[in-house]
Each structure stands twice: as structure tokens, then as C-alpha cells.
Amino acid sequence: MPPQHPSEPSPGRLAVLRGPRPPQEYTARKITALTANPACARRAVLDAAGVDKALLAQRLGHEPRFGQSPFAIRRERSFEALVKWGGYAELVRLLREQLGTPVEEAAVADLNEVGGDDSLALRARETRRLLGRLASGADERLILDRPVLTLEVAGQTAHVIPQALSHRTGGRFYVVEIRSFPAIDGQANPTAVAQTTKQAAVSVLALQHTFAELGLAPEAISHMFLLICPKDFSNRPYGRLIDLRQELQALRFQLSRLRRADDLAHALSPSATLDAERPESEIDATMRELDASYTPDCLSFCEMSRYCRDEATACASPARLGGAVRNSLPGIDSLRTALGRLDGVSAPGTAEEAVIARLRAAERLRRLRGGATA
Ligand code: SF4
């Protein structure tokens, strides 16, 4: 076999890093977390390799402390079953209410499996076949339950699975997301809505990507998605159309900033591993080879955040104090270095002079203001 050039894509490299465990798929949730910190090579490789990050964090002694509770997951599943009951009768009702389409019922294609086979490749193929039919005008009133769409993320093909795709209504298809957080007097928790909106944007982008691959007109995809959640304190489904244009634009930009995970994986040493069964010291050494871009925001979306926070603390990284501090100290990788320069222990290099001068000016200002207050 001819030797492989290091820059040639090697799908096996990421699998070797992961070890024998089956890969964890990209999800809309994961993709939004990845794009929240596109500068982080560490997360890009972990996700592209399909590593179980929660397990890896545990193995490194940093149990993640966030995520949906089993109770919330159960509640979401039972609410989703309620919305889907009777051939998505509630979805059809909500589309009628929101868009004024006079459709009373629709057929449903269950894409959770195809002929008893739940492999993603087969489900994606069947989704594409049905999308082709729908776009050609056949099966106008067909709802797709859990369609499997594809999207390029950091040089890898990700499978994105929205909860549903509406039947064609007013000439358009709508991505549907079902969540169990309530809308009280028409208002749901803004943070939860923002998160869901970002995830819906991933689904719409994947739908656009799939349409483009099939040569279908993207105008048939709505830039609104239908959020369905329980109304007030009842279990009655409530629906609201939400505009995604801003999120779509932001997401496209963030995805374009992600570096190719395969290239990053190639740059690691041959013995690198992210296999949770291997000794902790080997995993730790690999993690340190991968550039991280920690900020305190990571604590709200990444399973590795406690590990990365301890690492940032140990090396006194400016990012430990937040993105604003990190961005104010370009070229300075340690707070100890900054303090040393300020105290005159060491002289700033040419690239650091402007930053140190700004810090001195800030210090003078603080003293002046302190004096004025006293
Ligand atoms: S916690 Fe670590 S791995 Fe996760 S996004 Fe932040 S820096 Fe990257």
C-alpha cells in the first residue's frame, strides 16, 4: 500500500483516537455547543471522533455537572408522544392555527427506522427519497417523523435529526421542535427558547444542505420553525412560529470558522489516544496536545469544562477570567507573565509592549479614581 500523505483525509485516524467504543453521533445540541466556541480544537476533535465526552471527563476526574436530568428527559418524551399521537393531529392543528392552512389531517412517514433497520445511512437515504417526492409535488400532506438530514461540520458529515418536518403548507416545509418547558401566558423561558432556536437553525441548515445536494429549490424551506411546548400548567400543546434568519446567519459564520478535525487529528503524536479505557496519563497527554480555548461560558455547554478550567487555572490563563480579559491581553498567555511585566520583574517583548502600556494606564486610572473616592 502506498504511504499516505499526512494531509490526505484518513477517516480511520479519528476512529483510532476514540478506541473500540461506538462513535457518538453529532446532534443539533452538540453542533450548537461546538459553534459556541469555534476556536477550540480540543472540542472539534472530541466531537468529530465521536468520543463520549462525559465518560472521558469522568475518567480524568472531572465529572460534568450539567445536562438534562432523567426526569426532564422522561417528561420531554411523554410530551412528544402526546404531540405525535393520532398522526400528529396536534401538529396539524397548530399549523392550521398559526398559518391558516385549511388542512385537517396528514399522513406520517415514520423515519425512526426503515423496515426494522434504524441505521442512520438507511434512514438518511429514505429521507432523501421522500424529500425528492415531496418537492416534486407528490405526497403534499406527508409529515416526516424524525427525518435524517446531513450537514458538513469541521470536515465531517454530521447527521441531524429534527423531531419532525411539517407537510408542505403554503408551499413551504417547516422544521418542528417539541420541548417540554411550558409557555405561560404565551411566554416560555427565554434561555430555553434561545437554545431551541439555535438547534432548529442547525436542522434548517441541514435541510438546506440536503435540498442543495438533491438539486431542489431552497425557497421551499421556511426560515421560521414551529416550536411546540405545553401551554400554561396543562399538557395541552401550544405552538409558536419563530424566525431563524439571525441564527442561520450566525451559525453559517461559526461553522465556516471550524477547523478541519481530520487535519487536527493528523497533527497529534502517533501514540495519542482519547480512549477512556487507556491510562489516564496517556489521555491527559493527548488532551494537552489539543489547543483548548477555555472561557467560563464553557461551564454551561461542554462536558470537559471542569477539566479545561483546572488546566486554565494551573497555567494562570487570562481566559480563566473570561473572554473579555483574554481578548484584552493579546499575546500574553499567562496572568503571571502579565504581573511579572507590570512589576518590572521581566521586560515586555516587542509584541507585548502595547498591552503592558495599556495595563499600566488602567492601573494609574484606577489609583486616581480610588484617590478621588477617598
Ligand atoms: S470546555 Fe474545553 S473542550 Fe470544551 S469548549 Fe471549552 S475549552 Fe473546548
Image (cartoon, grey):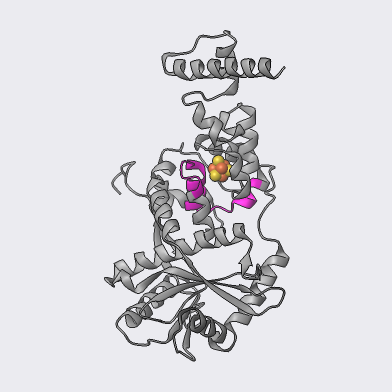
Q: Is residue 317 visible?
A: yes
- In the rendered view, does 119 fall on the left or right side of 312? left
Q: Nearer the viewer, residue 202 or 153?
A: 202
Q: Is residue 154 visible?
A: no
Above or below residue 80? Residue 340 is: above
Which residue is drawn at the image coordinates 60% and 69% (left, top)? 179
Q: Position of residue 187 (x, y in %)?
A: 62, 66
Q: Quadrant of the C terminus?
A: top right
Which residue is drawn at the image coordinates 59% and 17% (left, top)? 363
Q: Is residue 338 magenta?
A: no
Q: Quadrant of residue 181?
A: bottom right
Task: Tell me the magenta residue range.
Answer: 36-57
Which residue is drawn at the image coordinates 65% and 80% (left, top)? 236
Q: Is residue 38 magenta?
A: yes
Q: Quadrant of ligand 1?
A: top right
Above or below residue 125? Residue 281 is: above
Above or below residue 84? Residue 315 is: above
Q: Nearer the viewer, residue 312 or 201?
A: 201
Which residue is drawn at the image coordinates 38% and 43% (left, top)? 263
Which residue in the rendered view is the most extreme toward the left? 215
> Which is the main secondary structure of the residues drawn in magenta?
helix
Which residue in the rendered view is the most extreme toward the bottom? 104
Q: Nearer the viewer, residue 73 or 44?
A: 73
- In the rendered view, does 322 fall on the left or right side of 59? left
Q: Position of residue 146 (x, y in %)?
A: 50, 75
Count of marks overlaid on the render:
0
Q: Position of residue 351 (x, y in %)?
A: 42, 18
Q: Position of residue 23 (x, y in %)?
A: 52, 58
Above or below residue 353? Residue 194 is: below
